[in-house]
Image: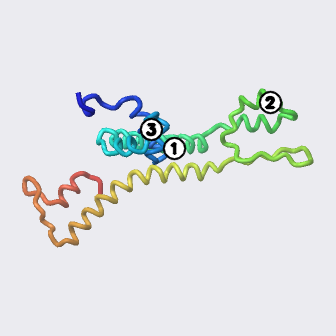
Amino acid sequence: MNKKERGITPREKQFCCLYANSGNFKEAALYAGFSNPDKTGAALLLRDDINAEIDKIYKSRTKNYRERARAGYERLAFGNVSDAVRLMFDDNPSEKPLESYDLFNVAEIKRPKDGAMEIKFFDRIKALEKLECAEDGEQKSVSDFYAALIGGIKSSGEKNIDFEGGRTAESEILEEGTI
């Protein structure tokens, strides 16, 4: 059985994860436990299955980071501030209840010399704007592509590029309903 048929070993999978973190194949091979990290790391990067696994890890992480950022903005925009208010009215807060407070929306807490407490919250409007930009960005990138494609077709002077059934490229794109 050759390497492609057996799939990626656990050690090779670990190499892929470590390489995705560091971008250094020698270091990744060393930490994954290969005896000759320089040679083995370079050889692993030549394999299609290894590169596919690394790409899968990159895409997964990017998606996870975007989702985590979106969740954070949603929490800032719509989150509860009752624990921060409770903290403000507590004269001498002990450590135990503080650990259970949800202070995610709090940007800054100050206690001036006069004994009062100032609490600044993150801006909910900015969080909503970031959420809206993220939504618009996803939609805009697709429509920008199609707009550029149509612009390229129009500027090339070949408006009647035939697809199947005698349809033009422009009609093909416009029927998708994205523009």
Residue beneath disc 1 = 70
- Element marked by disc 3: helix
> Relative to 152, does residue 24 appear above or below in the rendering?
above
Say whether marks 1 and 3 touch (CB < 8 Å). no
Q: Amino acid at mark 3?
A: Cys
The image quarter containing residue 104 is top right
Check the image and tell me how it is coloured. rainbow
For label 1, count other residues whose C-alpha is less than 10 Å away and answer few (under 14), some (14-19) or many (20+).
Answer: some
Element under label 1? helix
Q: Local crowd at mark 2 within 10 Å, few (<14), some, or many (≥20)?
A: few
The quarter of the image holding the N terminus is: top left
Q: Which residue is mark 2?
A: 95
Q: Position of residue 123 (x, y in %)?
A: 64, 50
The residue type indicated by label 1 comes to Arg
**CB atoms of marks 2 and 1 within 8 Å:** no
User: Of marks 2 and 1, which one's residue comes earlier in the chain?
Assistant: 1
Secondary structure type for disc 2: helix
Q: Disc 2 to disc 1, how far (Cα)?
A: 30 Å
